[in-house]
Image (cartoon, rainbow, N blue to C red):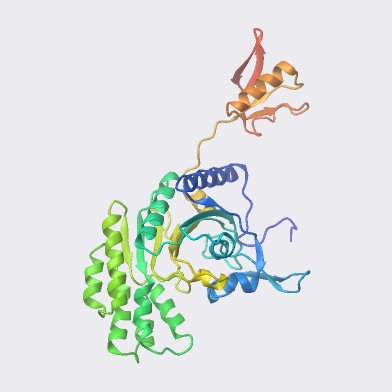
Amino acid sequence: MHTWLLPEAIEDLLPIEAAHVEHLRRHLLDDFARHGYQLVAPPLLEFADAILTGSGADLNLRTFKLVDQISGRTLALRADITPQVSRIDAHLLNRRGVTRLCYCGSVVHTRAAGLLATREPLQIGAELYGHAGLEADHEVIRLLAHALQLAELPPSRIDLGHVGIFRALTASVTLASGVDQQLFDALQAKDVPALRELTADLPDTVRDGLLALPDLYGGVEVLPDAAARLPALPEITRALGELQRLAGELSDLPLSFDLADLRGYNYHSGVVFAAYCDDSPSAVALGGRYDSIGERFGRGRPATGFSLDLRTLARLALPQQVPGAIMAPWPEDAVLQAEVDRLRAGGEVVVAALPGHVGSWREAGCDRQLVWRDGKWIIEPLVEH
């Protein structure tokens, strides 16, 4: 085996790809900042019991763990940055009012999430803390749609759901250990036969409600249909009311509704959403409300946000057309250096033509050259022999 081969689903980013990812990263983070979201940078490693407590089995299985040679405790390579940002809000910033935070960094997964997915996503996201009202959900959904527009990858649809509906249906019954996870898996897969088997012994209202969820998918007409088919529990009425309000306030976005979508069920607590684009069968961004996650850090706060993988976004979005570099001759003198400095200050990429490499500067990205003609420096198309 070649020693330079990378592990499965781990890849290098070559110059053009890396430049595209970096362009998107700066573009999105700058836009988040203009909306008042302040940048934070959590560490790649944390103690496992801090980063995984209360996160559910799914995140635990996706997380690489190792032993700290200093403390002897188990460390975790983060598989999700959202819990870390919640720790920063709850424990370090400790602000009284609304806090808006954004981030971007690598996460590492033990297994790829899909056939074409990487095990080292570059996660970027925005989180809003301290406001329990639906206005916060409205803001982050619109911010996500705007971010995808900036990436020239407008969403073809944004699916909305609400985990409160599932929680309300199962709260009145005692489920055997692990059955709630099996119900969750069956609903995610819209596996109606498995769902019928799992709900066979449940009360009629609960069983009928759970069996109705996979069919409650589509446009805004899903919501009155859900109100007619689901039990009139206060929590369900409130959840459907929140979705109806968002449908009205965000009517300019391509919204759809999926009441069986429970991704992030283990820590989400309200409205959840997933954004799709025409070129990807899987969601390009996920988000939702997670009001209780800060409790593990000593301060529960209302919270909602979203995240996406910049590598996936760069693969789907059209790369920005970047002009080639200018080759500057060697050796440099004061006059040439001044001209090079002027060009670089104006945004041009200028590459010094080190001696002994004739004929290789186009592969280095140069398409023009700086030449001395008629007593001045001018730029001409690069000619290589």
Q: Is residue 70 above or below residue 151?
A: below
Give the image quarter of residue 221.
bottom left
Give the image quarter of residue 231.
bottom left
306 on left or right of 138: right
Tell me the quadrant of the picture where the N terminus can be found: bottom right
Q: Is residue 25 above or below residue 320?
A: below
Frontmost residue, 260 versus 27: 27
385 on left or right of 225: right
Name the spot of residue 329 as percent of width and height, x first. Answer: 71, 21
Name the spot of residue 98 as percent of width and height, x first. Answer: 46, 57
Q: Is residue 127 above or below residue 36?
A: below
Name the spot of residue 368 as percent of width and height, x first. Answer: 61, 24
Name the spot of residue 255 as percent of width and height, x first. Answer: 31, 58
Work out whether residue 134 can be spotted.
yes
| Residue at 31% in and 70% down | 239
Frontmost residue, 120 versus 71: 71
